[in-house]
Image (spheres, rainbow, N blue to C red):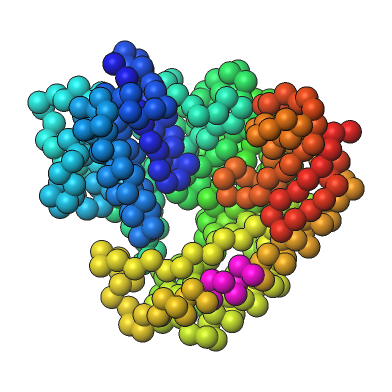
Amino acid sequence: MKLHLVSLGCAKNLIDSEIMLGCLVDAGWALTDNPSEAEIIIVNTCSFIEAAVNESIDTILELAKFKTSGFCRHLVITGCLPERFREEIVRSLPEVDIFLGTGAFDRIVQAVKGSPGLSKCFLPNPDLLPMQHRDAHRVRISSHMAYIKIAEGCGKHCTYCIIPKLRGKYRSRNHEDIIAEARCLVLSGVKELIIVAQDTTSYGNDLNKSVDLSGLLESISDISKDVWVRLLYGHPESIDESVIKTIAKHDNICSYFDIPIQHVSSSVLKRMGRKYTRDDLYRLFEKIRKTAPDCVLRTTAIVGFPGETDEEFQQLFDFVEDICFDHFGVFIYSDSEDLLSHRLSSHVPKNTAKKRHDWLMSRQADISLKNNQKYIGRVLRVLMEEKPKNNLFIGRTCFQAPEVDGITYINSNQLQLGRFVDIKITDAFEYDLAGKTV
């Protein structure tokens, strides 16, 4: 029996997909990359913003065609899309055989078997889903890089964000389970461990006070000094000085600070439900750069949030110019009736929000190019990941996270994928680098 799974959305969703695939392989299913061959097709969906919802629906409708043109006899939809739209989605997508919400990933084997005990739209409370076990079998997409989820859910209540409703309250994983998983991944040959959660820097706040993120990072770093450790999805409210110092202290922990700010105008931040100010952000990034002088900063922001004035946008623009982030992503506010922010007044026209997005990204392109040019002539350690054609390889430096940042091109006739190589940087672009072996 052949099965095909498509995973959409973030790295946290990808981990759920990998665990579901592990359960299905253990139950005897064979995996295929070709949906036309599959008897079961699964789509693990995202519904964070409107674009993600549209992508999920388009993917479902495209794969549903294999129920008539291929061998598919069962189409299963999991994750955030059914969790957000609930029973309403059953009427909207009659092509689907069963929907599983975010609290039902552990029922995937039952779902593909068509067990009679499951309703067509099964939506148990995400807070009751058992935490990932240290020995959970994962079918990983990469042999040299792996994400580790250290917590579920979110305890923040940003007015523009649906995640707490979709994923439940914040729950940290057991410290020992995370370390055991990390150790197994390193033994399997993984060269980069990427720590993720909805809010990584809140890790341990719901556990015994003796457990915190700094201690967790220390423990993971100590497993092997030949493996990169990277932390994603920090939060300005929860990152503390001990975490900054721990990252700066260890050579194998990437000095990479991913801290989405969303905005800097204090009035916009208040409407967003974010509990910090522009001055707090200036102090935070100053502290990071003082503690870790060679650090790389990454952030994201939202433009066109309800009520955002030209003056408030200018504050954000000026802040980006002042800080000169190495990596910066901009989202246009995505509205929906089930968001608290929908009820705010003075919604910004889409064309105005688009112009603000383009202005910021254009300025950031100049900043990124200037930041990248400082690497020309330097020798950097690069993790080899792809060989798209003869004499060309693609890799990443420690300051380039997968999927979200730029890449490094290497001209060489023979390199080993999944290994670190010293590369002399010869050219820099707005987001990417190029180099040669030394």
Q: Position of residue 245 (x, y in %)?
A: 70, 48
Q: Which region shows up in magenta? A: 356-362
Residue 339 forms part of the magenta stretch: no
Q: Residue 288 falls in which quadrant of the image?
A: bottom right
For the point 34% across and 39% down, the residue is 44
| Residue at screen point 51% across, 42% down | 196
Nearest the eye: 2 or 29 = 2
Q: Is residue 39 left or right of residue 289?
A: left
The answer to which of 319 and 61 lies nearer the viewer is 61
Quick one: quadrant of the N terminus? top left
Screen quadrant of the C terminus: top right
Query: Most extreme residue toward the left, as rendered?
Result: 116
Which residue is at the front of the view, 130 or 210?
Answer: 130
Q: How many marks?
A: 0
Q: Is residue 222 above or below residue 374?
A: above
Tell me: 233 left or right of 381: left
* Residue located at (38% from left, 36% from top): 6
- Residue 362, given in percent of the width and then of the height, sits at 64, 70
Q: Is residue 367 visible?
A: yes
- Left/right of residue 143 with respect to residue 158 in the rendered view: right
Is residue 82 depicted above or below 216 in this figure? below
Magenta stretch prevailing secondary structure: helix
Q: Position of residue 369 (x, y in %)?
A: 75, 61
Q: In the orientation shown, which residue stands out farthest toward the top? A: 28
Q: Is residue 329 left or right of residue 348?
A: right
At x 36%, y 84%, the residue is 346
| Image position, residue 105 (x, y; %) | 29, 33
Q: Quadrant of residue 326?
A: bottom right
Q: From what the image shows, is residue 372 above or below residue 158?
A: above
Which residue is outermost to the front? 69
